[in-house]
Image: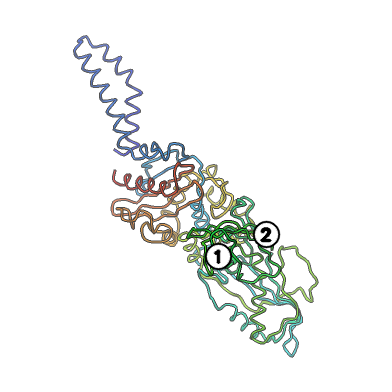
């Protein structure tokens, strides 16, 4: 019997025990009466004990580490459609980065695995006979997360852009390079993110023009323990940027520094600790105004190739922005294409890239409505999965990456998403290959290593403060399961919680 069958048998046994005892009282033979009672009560006790003893989920939820935790679990057999194991499966629980599978699965279904972001170079005004553009050059962004990214994309794209501009016959720009960010709203950082996260590289502002992973690298030179490290380099250079330095040199051997500051603000502060006596320790922060930095870098590239730009660059942040222009009609010079969405979502799911996830998340509403906003993307995701028969009352979404602690999803909802992508989606293979493999790749490289499940669990992990979550598949010769395990507010530390979840999965697969 599986656990659910065992439980149903025991519940039946318990619920009908009184009637069975009354039946025993009707026997005229005292000895038979006593024997029946004895075997009935023995069976009841043994049945109850065996369910507890043989049910790994009961063992898991009664572990001292989990006794105060919010837990949602569902494991489903994809071959039979049967629910094998569960614990409060409809209970909405903070998902952390497992939220990324919802973003990536929806994007695949609506935008397609072959979708490519387009960044357009265009100009207004006119080009005279000597090649002078009496007008402005525009970088028109559509949400591409890969421009200048360290993770993928063409590292030489600025040189190619400059070449395309020269091939268009332009020898001088009598105007500005303008970063047009108007296809996303101007919200920047998600308002549902915590203040401790905003300003750091893993929680950057999200704009129609993204550049260099929207990341600023700040290099410190640290001295003796207890002293304040010195800022020796900032890359890229940001005009008028100020950083209030409250760092301390410490005996730690890792980065414990955090930046603070709102999106596009050039006033930042940094707190925490970095290792002492380091000649060049890099701390990553959010990059303010990535679109403007891209325009500046393109202008520098053009000037290095001998093409003058007479006016400084600036940005168009919103769709209704107005400014004096020589001619508002734009002519396309060049279109830059990103890697396909299939490759981008692999980065999101395997490396848990928040920045990429949020760019794709906001791109959903740009794709559907022509303007990228968090609010509309949430609505698109909710309506899509509702149309597939899922109970969206078990979904509370605030972002696309899972960074917000106000996200909440049930194990039943996530498992249904996994079931749909495995059994009904034309993007099954792309989605499946985007997941990390336990003991092998991505964020699961160190999970279930040296266990029987190494190489057999394909999943997305989620970890923030007091949250551990996993959703995905267990696939081997004997089973095809979809599963979700989410635990909030456990006792102990994150690694202890992980070990308990690992043990639970191994024990369930041994049933």
Q: Which colouring convention does the figure follow?
A: rainbow
Q: Mark 2 points at which residue?
A: 185
Side of 180 where 463 appears, left or right: left
Sequence-first disc among 1 and 2: 2
Which corner quadrant of the image does residue 137 belong to?
A: bottom right
Residue located at (67% from left, 75% from top): 296
Q: In which quarter of the image is the N terminus?
A: top left
Residue neighbourhood size for the residue with mark 2, other residues' Cα within 10 Å, grouped as few (<14), some (14–19), many (≥20): some
Q: Position of residue 275 (x, y in %)?
A: 51, 61
Q: In the figure, residue 266 lies in which quadrant? A: bottom right
In front: 171, or 289?
A: 289
Q: Is mark 1 on a helix, strand or loop?
A: loop
Q: Where is residue 169 in the image (x, y as percent from the top left)?
A: 68, 87
Q: Where is residue 347 in the image (x, y as percent from the top left)?
A: 48, 63
Left-right relation of 275 to 57: right
Residue in front for this viewpoint, 248 or 33: 248
> How many C-alpha atoms fall within 10 Å of the one at disc 1: few (<14), some, or many (≥20)?
some
- Residue at which label 1 appears: 223
């Amino acid at each position: 019997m599986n656990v659910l069958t065992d439980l149903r048998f025991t519940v039946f046994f318990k619920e009908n025990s009184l009637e069975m005892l009354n039946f025993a009282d009707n026997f005229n033979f005292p000895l038979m009466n006593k024997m029946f009672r004895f075997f009935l009560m023995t069976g009841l006790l043994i049945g109850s004990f065996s369910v507890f003893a043989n049910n790994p989920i009961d063992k898991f939820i009664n572990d001292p580490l989990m006794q105060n935790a919010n837990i949602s679990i569902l494991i489903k057999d994809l071959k039979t459609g049967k629910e094998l194991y569960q614990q409060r499966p409809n209970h909405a629980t903070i998902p952390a980065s497992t939220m990324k599978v919802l973003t990536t699965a929806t994007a695949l279904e609506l935008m397609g695995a072959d979708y490519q972001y387009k960044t357009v170079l265009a100009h207004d005004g006119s080009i005279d006979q000597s090649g002078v553009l009496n007008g402005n050059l525009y970088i028109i962004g559509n949400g591409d997360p890969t421009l200048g990214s360290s993770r993928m994309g063409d590292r030489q794209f600025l040189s190619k852009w400059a070449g395309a501009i020269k091939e268009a016959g332009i020898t001088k720009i009598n105007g500005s390079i303008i970063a047009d960010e108007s296809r996303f709203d101007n919200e920047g950082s998600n308002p549902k993110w915590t203040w401790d996260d905003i300003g750091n590289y893993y929680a950057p502002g999200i704009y129609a023009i993204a550049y260099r992973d929207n990341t600023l690298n700040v290099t410190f030179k640290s001295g003796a323990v207890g002293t304040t490290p010195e800022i020796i380099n900032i890359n890229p250079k940001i005009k008028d940027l100020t950083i209030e330095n409250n760092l301390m040199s410490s005996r730690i051997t890792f980065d414990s520094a955090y930046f603070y500051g709102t999106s596009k603000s050039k006033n930042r502060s940094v707190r925490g600790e970095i290792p002492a006596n380091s000649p060049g320790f890099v701390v990553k922060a959010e990059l303010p105004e990535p679109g403007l930095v891209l325009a500046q870098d393109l202008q520098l590239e053009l000037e290095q190739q001998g093409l003058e730009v007479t006016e400084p660059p600036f940005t168009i942040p919103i769709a209704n922005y107005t400014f004096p222009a020589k001619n508002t009609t734009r002519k396309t010079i060049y279109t830059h294409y990103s890697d396909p969405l299939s490759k981008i979502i692999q980065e999101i799911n395997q490396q848990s890239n928040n920045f990429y996830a949020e760019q794709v998340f906001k791109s959903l509403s740009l794709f559907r409505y022509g303007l990228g906003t968090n609010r509309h993307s949430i609505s698109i995701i909710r309506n899509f999965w509702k149309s597939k028969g899922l109970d969206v009352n078990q979904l509370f979404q605030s972002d696309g990456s899972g960074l917000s602690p106000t996200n909440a999803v049930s194990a039943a909802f996530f498992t249904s998403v996994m079931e749909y992508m495995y059994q009904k989606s034309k993007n099954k293979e792309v989605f499946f290959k985007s997941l990390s493999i336990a003991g092998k790749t991505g964020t699961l490289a160190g999970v279930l290593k040296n266990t029987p499940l190494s190489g057999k669990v394909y999943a997305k992990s989620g970890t923030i403060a007091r949250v551990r979550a996993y959703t995905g598949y267990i696939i081997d010769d004997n089973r095809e399961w979809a599963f979700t395990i989410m635990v909030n507010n456990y006792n102990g530390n994150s690694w202890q919680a992980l070990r308990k979840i690992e043990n639970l999965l191994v024990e369930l697969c041994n049933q």
